[in-house]
Amino acid sequence: MKNERLLEAYESFCRLMVEERLYLNPTLTYETVCRWLGVGEKELDAQLSRELGYTGPALIQHFRKQTNYRLCDTYGINLYGGQTE
């Protein structure tokens, strides 16, 4: 039962990031997403690391950086100010 709940949370996290693009909300935290999904941060981190090689906070940051790079290249827009890394 626990594994099933964790897999559901993992799938929901992925959908929230990829389909809903919640990472675009600059105030969104990994802690908040885990609370919404009803799963512990460490549990979901372990699943994300196994499946994708990233922790939850690192994935959110990765999505944000990639979007920022694309917008900078395409439109000269930097969502977060400063330089892109």
Image: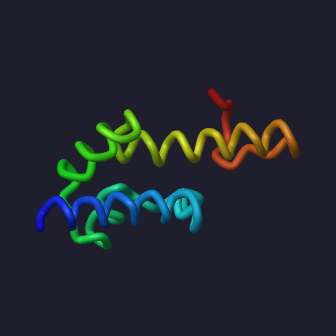
Left or right: 7, with 82 as reference point:
left
Residue at the (35%, 64%) spot, across then down: 33
Q: How many marks?
A: 0
Left or right: 69, with 85 as reference point:
right
- 41 or 79, nearer to the observer: 41
Quadrant assignment, res 4 = bottom left
Return the x and y of residue 52 as percentages of the image width and height: 40, 39
Return the x and y of residue 21 as percentages of the image width and height: 58, 62
- 78 or 65, nearer to the observer: 65
Q: Does 47 sit above or below residue 23?
A: above
Residue at the (38%, 33%) spot, across then down: 53
Farthest residue in the left direction?
A: 1
Q: Does 71 sit above or below residue 18?
A: above
Left or right: 82, with 53 as reference point:
right
The colour scheme used here is rainbow
Left or right: 52, with 70 as reference point:
left
Return the x and y of residue 23 as percentages of the image width and height: 53, 57
Return the x and y of residue 75 as percentages of the image width and height: 88, 45
Q: Quadrant of the N terminus?
A: bottom left
Residue at the (18%, 51%) spot, across then down: 43
Residue at the (69%, 43%) spot, across then down: 68
Q: Quadrant of the C terminus?
A: top right
Farthest residue in the right direction?
A: 75
